[in-house]
């Protein structure tokens, strides 16, 4: 039997919207071993570190060009009081992290440590302020402490703690999941709070904040509408409000129930397809929120931010249920590649996305062994690395005139081939995923308006969807060089079952700018 052939047309000279690099953003919460034992090993650690920040973690993430890092939560953000995390460590008060494991938080990783981490990573900070249990003054002071120059009470405090110059902080979250752990607020109530908090988070000097209001849970479009109504006048009369520049929403891929989400490494083919259907739902959700936003803001001034996404499985057996530690297989990698194709298609409205979470929590890039300290790069890490050429690239639309192969999954239909493309710096990059557990596929890429030279490709796949990396077998799922065939029209790309392939090439002269 021959593989199904999927015709795909890409006009290399028809630019779409720019894919913000911030769609490749990350998230680090004070949760489990993400900060402590992940990013931060403390100043007494034998592992190579800078001020307690683990340097091999930094090096691995630098290779991804991570654009921004969201911190300190998540749910933790709404019980975090930033002043507890500055000054000499031995004098910082402790607190109980009631959301995540009821463990004691000693506040040794605070504002200065986070900003040092961002500097080491070359990533922009995205700070989530505390609306749920904080005060307007507390948040306003934090912004002043971080970003103000000259002389003021918060500037003097920052200087006393050893930092002369202000930092540049653009992205600022006004709380998190205000409908849930962030205060169980109603949409109208939160919208009023966000206006107030957003007002007193000032732009100091040359530092202009990009304030992100805490948005909807999944498909709660009414929440988005309530926030949009606060932001300005309806429709074409819209003028951006000064106190909120974006709103967020969260979507996790959980194919099971909340009580039994499914195991990360032990699953069957049906579970795999249900997972892919859940992941693909992000397209419907971004479309839904964007449609609501378009009614109020047709000019696209207000950004949509998906600041938590990824798979959420049962914790690994024997680990603390409050620490959300899970393994990461080839299936997780395909969830990530599918999300990125969707993100690229929505690049006009979607300005930022943050996978949850970077190290040792949920769909992580990096897992570290608590005993030996060994560091493992997950299959998801490799998708971020293989796709990094899309950051700040011009998106190219992919037309699939005959559709793609599909599978029936319960009442849903899953398109099993997914693609996206972009161009940047004289090169084109194509990402292709075959989500089918068993069947290969072939994509016939019809490249119009230009031509490619010096084509190369890489593939991420493994014998089984359940395959993953461990300290003993760190390269079970890792990218390998791959061959694609040049054709008269463009390229023929074979996609083995459950695989992710990237193809790149130099745009020959005359292929648009
Ligand atoms: O990422 C884990 C948690 O999921 C976050 O703290 C919260 O915002 C979400 O519910």
Image (cartoon, grey):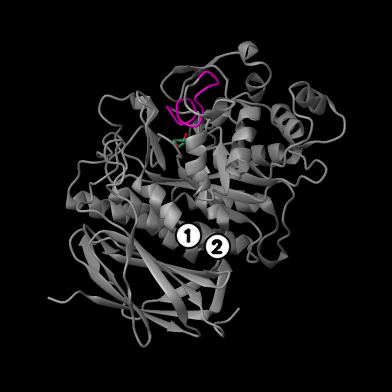
Relative to 215, residue 158 above or below:
above
Question: Any magenta on residue 37?
Answer: yes
Residue 362 visible to the viewer? yes
**Image quadrant where one finds the C terminus:** bottom right
Comparing 400 with 47, the one in front is 47
Disc 2 element = loop
**Labelled pair 2, 1 in contact (Cβ < 8 Å):** yes
Q: Residues in magenta?
A: 32-44
Q: Which secondary structure type mostly characterizes the magenta part of the structure?
A: loop
Comparing 345 with 231, the one in front is 345
Q: Which residue is mark 1?
A: 343
Residue under the point 64% across and 11% down? 91
Residue extending farthest to the top is: 91
Image quadrant where residue 473 sits? top left
Residue 223 visible to the viewer? no
Residue extending farthest to the right is: 151
Q: Which residue is mark 2?
A: 19
């Amino acid at each position: 039997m021959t593989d199904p052939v999927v015709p795909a047309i890409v006009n290399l000279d028809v630019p779409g919207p720019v894919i913000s690099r911030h769609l490749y953003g990350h998230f680090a919460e004070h949760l489990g071993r993400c900060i402590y034992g992940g990013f931060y090993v403390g100043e007494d650690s034998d592992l190579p570190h800078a001020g307690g920040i683990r340097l091999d973690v930094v090096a691995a993430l630098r290779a991804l060009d991570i654009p921004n890092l969201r911190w300190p939560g998540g749910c933790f953000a709404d019980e975090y009081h930033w002043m507890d995390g500055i000054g000499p460590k031995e004098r910082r008060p402790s607190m109980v992290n009631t959301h995540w494991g009821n463990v004691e938080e000693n506040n040794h990783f605070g504002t200065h440590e986070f900003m040092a981490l961002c500097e080491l990573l070359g990533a922009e900070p995205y700070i989530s302020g505390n609306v749920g249990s904080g005060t307007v003054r507390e948040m306003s002071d934090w912004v002043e402490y971080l970003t103000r120059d000259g002389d003021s009470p918060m500037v003097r405090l920052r200087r006393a703690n050893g930092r002369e110059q202000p930092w540049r902080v653009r992205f600022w979250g006004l709380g998190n999941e205000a409908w849930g752990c962030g205060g169980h607020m109603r949409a109208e109530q939160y919208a009023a709070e966000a206006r107030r908090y957003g007002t007193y988070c000032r732009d100091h000097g040359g530092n202009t904040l990009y304030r992100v209001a805490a948005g909807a849970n999944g498909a709660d479009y009414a929440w988005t509408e309530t926030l949009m109504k606060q932001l300005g006048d309806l429709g074409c009369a819209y003028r951006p409000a000064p106190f909120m520049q974006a709103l967020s929403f969260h979507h996790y891929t959980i194919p099971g129930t909340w009580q039994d989400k499914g195991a990360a490494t032990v699953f069957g083919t049906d579970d795999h397809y249900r997972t892919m259907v859940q992941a693909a739902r992000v397209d419907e959700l971004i479309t839904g929120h964007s449609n609501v936003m378009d009614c109020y803001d047709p000019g696209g001034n207000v950004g949509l931010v998906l600041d938590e996404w990824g798979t959420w499985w049962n914790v690994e057996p024997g680990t603390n249920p409050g620490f959300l530690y899970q393994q990461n297989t080839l299936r997780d990698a395909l969830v990530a590649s599918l999300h990125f194709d969707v993100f690229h298609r929505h690049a006009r409205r979607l300005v930022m996305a943050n996978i949850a979470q970077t190290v040792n929590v949920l769909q992580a890039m990096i897992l570290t062994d608590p005993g030996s300290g060994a560091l493992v790069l997950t299959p998801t890490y490799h998708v971020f690395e293989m796709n990094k050429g899309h950051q700040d690239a011009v998106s190219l639309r992919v037309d699939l005139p005959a559709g793609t192969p599909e599978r029936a999954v319960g009442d849903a239909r899953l398109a099993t081939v997914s693609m996206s493309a972009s161009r940047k710096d004289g090169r084109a990059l194509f990402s292709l995923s075959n989500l089918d557990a068993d069947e290969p596929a072939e994509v016939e890429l019809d490249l119009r308006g230009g031509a490619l030279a010096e084509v190369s490709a890489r593939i991420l796949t493994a014998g089984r969807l359940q395959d993953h990396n461990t300290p003993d077998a760190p390269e079970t799922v890792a990218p390998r060089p791959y061959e694609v065939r040049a054709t008269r029209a463009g390229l023929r790309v074979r996609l083995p079952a459950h695989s992710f392939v990237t193809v790149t090439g130099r745009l020959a002269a005359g292929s648009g700018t």
